[in-house]
Image (cartoon, rainbow, N blue to C red):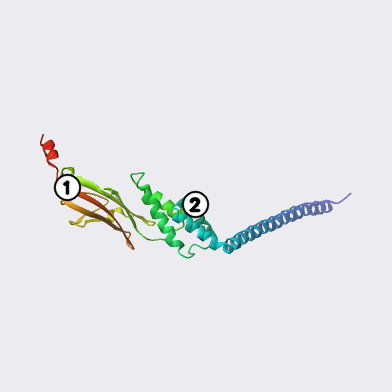
Amino acid sequence: MLSRRTRYSIQLVVILSIFFFVLFNLVFKLIVDLRSESMQKEAEEAKKQRERLAFIVHIEDHYEELQRLYQAKEYEKAIEIIKLFNAHEKPDYKNLPEIKKEIRLVYLKKKLDFIPKIQLDEYMQLSKDIDIEEDDSTEVFIRTPRYGQYFYTSNFPIHLEGVALSVQGDFSDTLVWTSSLDGKLGTGQKIDVRPSIGEHEITATGTNGRTTGSMTTRIYIEKDPDFLKQHIRD
């Protein structure tokens, strides 16, 4: 018969053996997982390097294709190529920053023809899409009046509305409105004015505190014709 002390010692050895066996398996699995993850990261990094090298080798071809799409006004396709330049750490290649900014402005101004308002989140999303978050320029858009509109004095007051946007936020309240004939018309995102008779170049100027932007439109103010005066009196 084994003594109680001997049995206790055997049980302790068995328990310790099981414990170290489990611990060894856990450590071994952890090492394997870490090695596998490391190998996977190395493989992904090697793939990125190969793709980057292939892009760099043909970078001038990509740039020429971007120029072609930009000149053809195929802006959505151009943005996809711009994303490649950004992904491969070439965001400032040649005049790429200027192309980015021009595409953003053309795209947003084009939207003015289809929707009544440009919202800040749309502006920010496009800025993010073509990677110009660091651009601190202020862009101004006049929503109304449209370029070349004619107004009679009976249409007064004339409503002026615009936006001043920056990647830092909406600065529309800073807008200053001026006329080539009447000088300063007022400040704010929306104002009503009574311009003098004649051809006016209306300019809206805004600032984000660091940079200033502006946009100009042209309107024509005329006296009411006689038939309209008679209609108004009647």
* Location of residue 230 (image quadrant): top left
Counting from the top left corner in percent of width and height, residue 53 is at: 60, 63
In the picture of the structure, the residue carrying the numbered disc 2 is 77
Of marks 2 and 1, the one in the foreground: 1
Q: How many numbered discs sit on the rendered protein?
A: 2
Counting from the top left corner in percent of width and height, residue 17 is at: 79, 54
Asked if one can make out residue 193 in the rendered structure from this viewpoint, the answer is: no
In the picture of the structure, the residue carrying the numbered disc 1 is 222
Residue 42 versus residue 151 in the image, above or below: below
Amino acid carrying label 2: it is: Lys
Counting from the top left corner in percent of width and height, residue 90 is at: 51, 63
Q: Which residue is depicted at the point 59% across and 61% down?
A: 52
Counting from the top left corner in percent of width and height, residue 27 is at: 71, 56
Q: Which residue is depicted at the point 51% across and 57% down?
A: 65
Label 2: state its secondary structure.
Answer: helix
Asked if one can make out residue 200 in the rendered structure from this viewpoint, the answer is: yes
Q: CA distance from mark 2 to mark 1?
A: 45 Å
